[in-house]
Image (cartoon, rainbow, N blue to C red):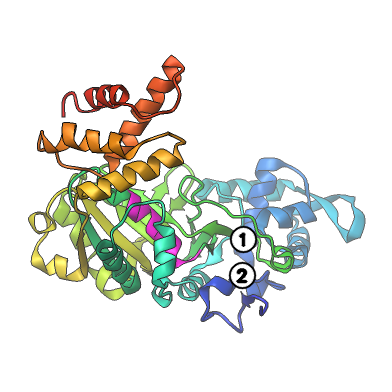
Amino acid sequence: MPAPTALSDQNPVLPNSERFWPKAPGSLPATGLAEPEVSSLILKYLYNRGGESGARLAAQLGLRFGVVEPILRQLKADNLVIYKGALAGGDYQYELTELGRSRGLGLAEQCTYFGTAPVPLGHYIASVKAQSITAIKPPLSDIQAALSDLKINPELMSNIGQAIHSGRGMFLFGSPGNGKTSIAERVTKSFGDTIWIPRCISAAGEIIRLFDPNRHKPVTVTNGDILENADGRWIHIERPTIVAGGELQMENLEITVIRKTGIGEAPLQLKANCGTLLIDDFGRQKMPVDQLLNRWIIPLEQRHDFLQLESGRSIQVPFDELIIFSTNLEPKDLVDDAFLRRIPYKIEVKDPTASDFKALMLLLAKKLEFQCEPAMVDYLIQAFYETRNRPFRYCHPRDLLRQIENRCSLHNLPKVVTREGLDQAVSNYFSIM
C-alpha cells in the first residue's frame, strides 16, 4: 500500500480523500500565518498563564519549536518577553516584561483566544476539496454495510444509494417511527471513516472555531509516520453527521461571535463539511421554513456558501456535504417546486409489510438474546395489528422488546417472548396511541 500523501504548499489538493493528511509546516511561511498572528497568541498565553518554556508554547500552538523559536527571539528583541532560565536543548523559560503584559492585555481585550494556532481559510478550503464527498462514489456493498443494522428493502436501499452518489441532498419523508433519522445518521459511514479538520480557521484576521467536541468525534491516529509528522493544528475525526432539529434558528447558520471573548463559532453547515447535515423533523423549526430554504438556495446550487465576519466582510466557504431533510410531512406541503428541484431525491420511507415486521422482530429478539418463536410474532400481528387496523412501524419491534426486557428484569423472568409479555407490552405502549 502506498504511503499516505500529505497536504503541503506544493500539493494543496489531493485526489484521494482517504489518503489526505496535513503535514507539519517547517517554517512560518508554510503555516500560512503572518508573524503577528502567532506572536499575539504567545503574548496572550503568557499573559494568562505566566511563564512557560518555548517547547511548551510551541506544543500549545500546535507548531514545531523550530517555527516558534524565531518569533520568541523577536519578541525578546522587542522587549516583550525575557528569559527566566535556560533549559535543555537551547530552550528557555519565557515571561512577559511590563511592556509585554500591557501588549498581552490589549490583545486579550480584542480576542481572548490563545489556543492552537489557526489554519488559514485557503488551506482549509484545499482540505475540503481533498476530502470532498462528491469525489466518493461508494459501492452498494459499502452503503449496505453502513445501514446493515436497519431492515431496509432493496428498493429503498437503491434510492438511498443513488442520493448518496449525487452528493447533494435528499428528502426522507414518511410516517414517524420508520427510521428516517436512523437512516440519515448512518449514511455518512458510506463515505469513508475519517477526515482531518482544523481546530480553528483564520479569515481576514478573525478566528473561527471549527472543531466542536460536542459534534465531532476525534479518532486516534495509529500510523506512526503521520502521528509524528502531522500538523498539530489539525485534528483527526470521524466524518461528521451534524443533526439539527426543531431548535434550529437562523443564527445557527451564521458565524456566532461570543462578545466577551471575540471568538467566532462556525455555523452548523461548516462543521458538517465532508459529511452529512441532517435537518431532522423538518417543518417544525422555530424559524419559518421559507426563511431556512432561502438561506440555502445558493449553497445547494453552487456548492459554496457566504458567511459574514464580525467586521462585516463576507467570505466564501465550501458547502460540501450531503444535506438530508427528514420530515413526517409531505415535502410538497412544506416547500415550493423551485426548491424541491434543488433537492434531487425525495424518498418515502414506507411502513413495513407484515413479513418485514416479523423478520425484524425475530432479528432484534436474537440480538437482544430473547427466545422468540415465530408463532409469538404471528400472534402479535394478528391480535394487535390486523384486527385493529394498526399500521406497522419499524420502531415497534425494538420498543416492544424493550418493554418485555424490562418486565423480565423486574420479575426475574427468563428472556422469553410470551403472550402474557406481549399483551402487557402492547398495553403499556399503545394505551393512548
Q: Position of residue 245 (x, y in %)?
A: 29, 45
Please give the label number shown on residue 22: 2
Q: Give the range drawn in magenta.
A: 182-192
Distance from disc 1 to disc 2, alpha carbons, whole Å, reads 9 Å
Q: What element carries label 2?
A: strand
Please identify the quarter of the rendering in which residue 223 is found: bottom right
Q: Return the disc, 1 or 2, that comes first in the chain's sequence.
A: 2
Number of marks in picture? 2
Question: Relative to 315, does residue 9 appear above or below in the rendering?
Answer: below
Give amino acid for label 1. Answer: Arg
Residues at discs 1 and 2 in contact (Cβ within 8 Å): yes
Q: Where is residue 374 in the image (x, y as percent from the top left)?
A: 32, 40
Q: What element carries label 1?
A: loop
Give amino acid for label 2. Answer: Pro
Q: Nearer the viewer, residue 206 or 11?
A: 11
Please give the label number shown on residue 233: 1
Residue plotted at (43% across, 59% down): 146
